[in-house]
Image (tube, rainbow, N blue to C red):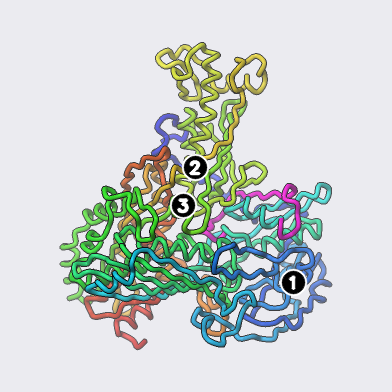
């Protein structure tokens, strides 16, 4: 389909406009930013997990030709403020900390000095001349270590290494468990894995001495939040700070927060009155960039003999690493807690959470940060099925809440409405021939091959509702969009969203083009510049763009369009209700000869307002806010087929099926891309990726030789079915970016359990699913 199409563009698989520059090498990433005067900044990082800095000798580095400055932690502390990234949340003990280590280091990779030099070669040579001696302290690596009696305390402000402790209860849990025919218990130890985007963190900070302006071109998904916080930490007047974001080579949540490096780089640029560039290399990204999914959850389910759920109890312990970043840890645990009952009837529910401080890099917002809740719940559903003699399909069907029974109060105590998980699951089941698979499974076993099939379902806050986020303790923010018609009739829309692979430049342009009656190519989407976009605390995150950004664009377009029609009505002596805009021409319906070009009207408003109709609003620019209409939910159901080699422990996935519902689809190819990418990330995280630490606190996966990423052979062909069930909102669309990553691990592990059950293999309750762990579970090797 041509990208110049006007009518019916929403719902069409328009080619992504950003792909042209990205695929031809003309995109602008952080390493493309800067000019000849830009200096290179390089962080010297701790090589020990826990210790006092006894000596830091930088004299030789400062004397190296080409070195402009070497800034130590105490130097940096003299012109920055301590980082405060906590929140007034009951039970939260959030420590403050300096931009670079001053006296104590608390993880391998913590920045202890910043070298500024003419180029990267000189900077890294200088870093090699810096001498550091540590008085070693005992490392605290796991949550078990952190909570042990007599464990070393990482911070005075964090007694017992407990960053957060909290929980809640809905319904009569004790009664539910007392009346149960069966009580089942399960535990999942989910390993730590990272985002590993193609482009790591980085930025170019430039201080203009003549104006006092600091410009920071950063790889971030929250430009206004970064500007607000960094300006405060470095004492830079916020009106003299600008954050600009161009293309981003992936994020997956990594670039939601601000980091110490952002603060240090901007502070150093201001201190030196210079332009500094820092681009994280892969070792830095893996070692110091942070990771997630470092949690243990114990779950208990009370059920009737027929498989009906009476109640659930869950206890979550999260390893948050050494230093808190955004969002605060309780936000992650609370989302997991409130979402854990899922789209099922759960009359009684108790949740508790504890977050620990350890000598690891920070816990970050990896795509679908709450995903452990889906993993433990969907595996429990299979355990219930086995206990009461039902199939995994039957036990889900017995407990899912269909749309026809909504609104209803969820197990988490908030209103669940418009959740179509039951409907997507029914569609999924209708596409699988279970009898044929069981026959194939039996035949394969006779040949020594293990086959398995796992299913699962879920729903996610995409964007959720004000009631839900109120319980979490996080704001449900409205979405602003600024839109204007240019003098030549083209349209520019300014969004607070910062795309990093989701295709916002395409989908938002489709929405604006259809609303305004102009060609797709006549719409430009501007993002990432705090001087141009409307302030909002949250940029891109939480799969909210599909609904919230779309709504903002629609409201802004309709407001400007209404003004255009009022002006044109006066020019054409017609009623605004009788006018239409098609192909950038305003005409009277049924009388196409009575018309005026949008470009002609716009030029008049800009260049000759006195000659235009009076008494109407000639301003062709408006900032509109979409309130979300009480929000909405994304949902989906997955099925995963596996084959397991009993000699090598290798797991292959011959088939993967997704049935998803994100409401009205703006661009099918973009939605498919998000689903496929999410599933690939979820499978890779379970099978290969592991941000591993030794018992001594040393990081063990600092390169892609050790931190394994999925490649084409590991990712199956993914079948996708869209349902697009209607919702009453103006937008009709919801988010879809995180679902694949959230649900794929559960579907995969359920399939592995199904395969193991044929030969009496043990259930795997600690991830990742390495070949060694598979062979241990099968009894092939000891473990």
* Secondary structure beneath label 3: loop
Regarding residue 705, the answer to whether it shows in the image is: no
Indicate the quadrant where residue 285 lies. Answer: bottom right
Nearer-N-terminus badge (2/3): 3
- Tag 1 residue: 73
Where is residue 178 shown, x and y percent of the image? Answer: 27, 74
- The circle drawn on residue 543 is 3
- Tag 2 residue: 627
- The circle drawn on residue 378 is none
Is residue 193 found left or right of 344 in the rendered image?
right
Give the mark toward the camera: 2 or 3: 2
Quadrant for the N terminus in the image: top left
* Secondary structure beneath label 1: helix
Nearer-N-terminus badge (2/1): 1
Where is residue 647 shown, x and y percent of the image? Answer: 30, 80
Regarding residue 114, the answer to whether it shows in the image is: yes
């Amino acid at each position: 389909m041509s990208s110049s199409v006007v009518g019916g563009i929403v719902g069409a698989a328009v080619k992504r406009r950003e792909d042209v520059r990205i695929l031809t090498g003309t995109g602008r990433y952080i390493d493309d930013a800067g000019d000849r005067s830009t200096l290179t900044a390089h962080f010297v990082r701790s090589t020990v997990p826990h210790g006092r800095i006894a000596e830091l000798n930088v004299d030789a580095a400062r004397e190296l030709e080409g070195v402009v400055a070497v800034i130590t932690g105490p130097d940096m502390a003299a012109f920055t403020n301590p980082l405060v990234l906590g929140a007034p949340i009951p039970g939260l003990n959030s420590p403050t900390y300096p931009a670079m280590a001053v006296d104590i280091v608390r993880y391998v990779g913590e920045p202890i000095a910043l070298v500024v030099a003419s180029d990267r070669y000189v900077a890294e040579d200088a870093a090699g001349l810096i001498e550091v001696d540590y008085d070693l302290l005992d490392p605290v690596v796991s949550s078990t270590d952190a909570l042990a009696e007599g464990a070393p305390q990482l911070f005075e402000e964090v007694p017992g290494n407990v960053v957060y402790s909290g929980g809640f209860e809905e319904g009569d849990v004790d009664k539910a468990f007392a009346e149960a025919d069966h009580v089942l218990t399960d535990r999942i130890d989910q390993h730590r894995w990272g985002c590993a985007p193609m482009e790591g963190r980085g930025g170019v900070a430039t201080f203009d001495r003549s104006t006092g302006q600091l410009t920071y071109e950063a790889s971030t998904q929250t430009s206004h939040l970064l500007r607000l916080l960094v300006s405060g930490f470095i004492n830079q007047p916020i009106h003299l700070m600008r954050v600009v974001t161009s293309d981003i080579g992936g994020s997956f949540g990594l670039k939601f927060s601000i980091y110490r490096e952002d603060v240090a780089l901007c502070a150093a640029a201001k201190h030196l009155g210079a332009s500094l560039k820092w681009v994280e290399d892969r070792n830095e990204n893996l070692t110091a960039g942070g990771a997630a999914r470092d949690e243990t959850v114990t779950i208990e389910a009370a059920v009737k003999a027929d498989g009906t759920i009476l109640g659930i109890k869950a206890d979550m312990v999260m390893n948050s690493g050494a230093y808190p970043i955004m969002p605060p840890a309780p936000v992650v645990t609370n989302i997991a807690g409130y979402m854990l009952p899922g789209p099922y009837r759960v009359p009684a529910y108790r949740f508790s959470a504890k977050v620990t401080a350890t000598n690891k890099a920070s816990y970050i917002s990896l795509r679908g940060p709450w995903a452990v809740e889906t993993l433990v719940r969907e595996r429990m559903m299979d355990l219930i099925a086995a206990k009461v003699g039902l199939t995994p399909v039957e036990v889900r069907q017995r407990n899912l809440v269909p749309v026809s029974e909504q609104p209803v109060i969820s197990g988490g105590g908030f209103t669940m409405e418009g959740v179509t998980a039951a409907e997507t699951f029914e569609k999924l089941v209708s596409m699988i021939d279970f009898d044929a698979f069981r026959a194939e499974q039996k035949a394969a076993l006779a040949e020594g091959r293990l086959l398995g099939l796992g299913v699962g379902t879920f729903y996610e806050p995409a964007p959720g509702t004000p009631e839900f986020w109120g319980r979490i303790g996080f704001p449900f923010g409205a979405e602003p969009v600024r839109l204007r018609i240019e003098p030549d009739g083209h349209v520019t829309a300014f969004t607070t969203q910062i795309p990093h692979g989701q295709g916002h430049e395409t989908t938002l342009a489709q929405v604006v083009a259809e609303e305004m009656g102009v060609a797709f190519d006549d719409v430009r989407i501007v993002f990432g510049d705090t001087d141009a976009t409307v302030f909002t605390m949250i940029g891109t995150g939480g799969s909210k763009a599909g609904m919230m950004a779309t709504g903002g664009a629609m409201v802004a377009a309709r407001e400007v369009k209404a003004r255009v029609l009022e002006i044109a009505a006066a020019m054409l002596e017609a009623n605004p209700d009788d006018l239409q805009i098609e192909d950038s021409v305003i005409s009277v319906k049924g009388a196409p000869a009575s018309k005026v070009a949008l470009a002609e009207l716009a030029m008049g408003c800009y260049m000759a307002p006195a000659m235009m109709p009076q008494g109407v609003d000639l301003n062709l620019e408006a900032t509109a806010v979409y309130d979300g209409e009480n929000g909405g939910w994304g949902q989906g159901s997955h099925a995963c087929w596996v084959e397991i080699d009993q000699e090598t422990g290798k797991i292959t996935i011959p088939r993967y099926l997704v049935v998803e519902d994100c409401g009205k689809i703006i661009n099918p190819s973009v939605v498919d891309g998000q689903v496929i990418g999410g599933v690939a990330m979820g499978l890779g995280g379970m099978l290969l990726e592991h941000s591993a630490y030794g018992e001594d606190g040393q990081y063990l996966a600092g390169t892609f030789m050790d931190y394994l990423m999925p490649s084409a052979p590991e990712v199956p062909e993914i079948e996708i079915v869209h349902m697009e069930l209607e919702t009453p909102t103006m937008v009709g669309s919801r988010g879809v970016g995180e679902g694949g990553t959230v649900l794929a691990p559960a579907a995969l592990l359920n399939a592995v359990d199904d395969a193991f059950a044929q030969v009496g293999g043990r259930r795997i309750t600690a991830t990742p699913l390495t070949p060694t762990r598979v062979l241990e579970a099968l009894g092939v090797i000891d473990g």
